[in-house]
Amino acid sequence: MHLIKHPHVLPFPFPEKNQRLKEAKEEAGMEIEAYRKERESQFKEKQKNVDGSKGDYTQKMEEEKVEKLDTIRQDIARNKQEVIKRLLNMVYDIKPELHQNKRVE
């Protein structure tokens, strides 16, 4: 195919259109980037809120654990002497008996 140069034909027939397409492409890219950054910041905010609530739950569970352990320690301290006394009474008070399966001959 042979191109004929015509004096009234421009090398780029619609330079304004090409320029506008480039600008539109750049604007769209900037809008997409702005939207992506906005969504990313929203995601990070939600993630921070979720992680924060997990931290609150963990802290609450830790407090409950400490409270229960303190209660158990107090019960041990209160009942320790009584339990020791009962165990020693069982050891010292031996009643020799024949086992129920033992036959007397």
Image (cartoon, rainbow, N blue to C red):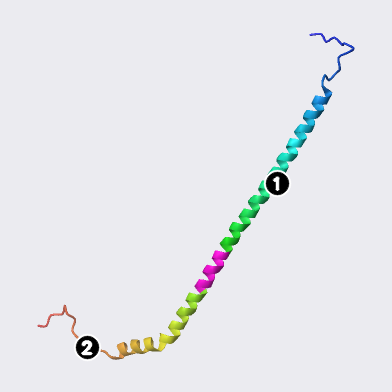
Q: Looking at the rendered structure, which numbered label has been put on residue 96?
A: 2
Of 65 and 52, which appears nearest the observer?
52
SS for dot 1: helix
Q: Label 1, label 2: how many angstroms apart (C-alpha)?
A: 85 Å
Instruction: Name the residue tied to disc 1.
Output: 37
Identify residue type, mark 1: Lys
The image quadrant of residue 94 is bottom left
Query: Label 2 crowding class (10 Å Cα cut-off): few <14, some 14-19, many 20+?
Result: few
Mark 1–mark 2 CB contact (< 8 Å) = no
Question: Where residue 19 sits: x, y (%)?
Answer: 82, 28
**Boundaries of the magenta span:** 56-65
Residue, far left: 105
Q: Residue furthest right?
A: 7
Q: Say if 40 sits above or below 71 in the image.
A: above
- Determine the secondary structure under disc 2: loop
Q: Could you tell me the amino acid type at mark 2?
A: Pro
Percent coordinates x, y for residue 93 in the rendering: 28, 91
Residue 98 percent location from the top left of the image: 18, 84
Tell me what residue is drawn at x 65 percent, y 50 percent: 42
* As drawn, 52 above or below 11: below
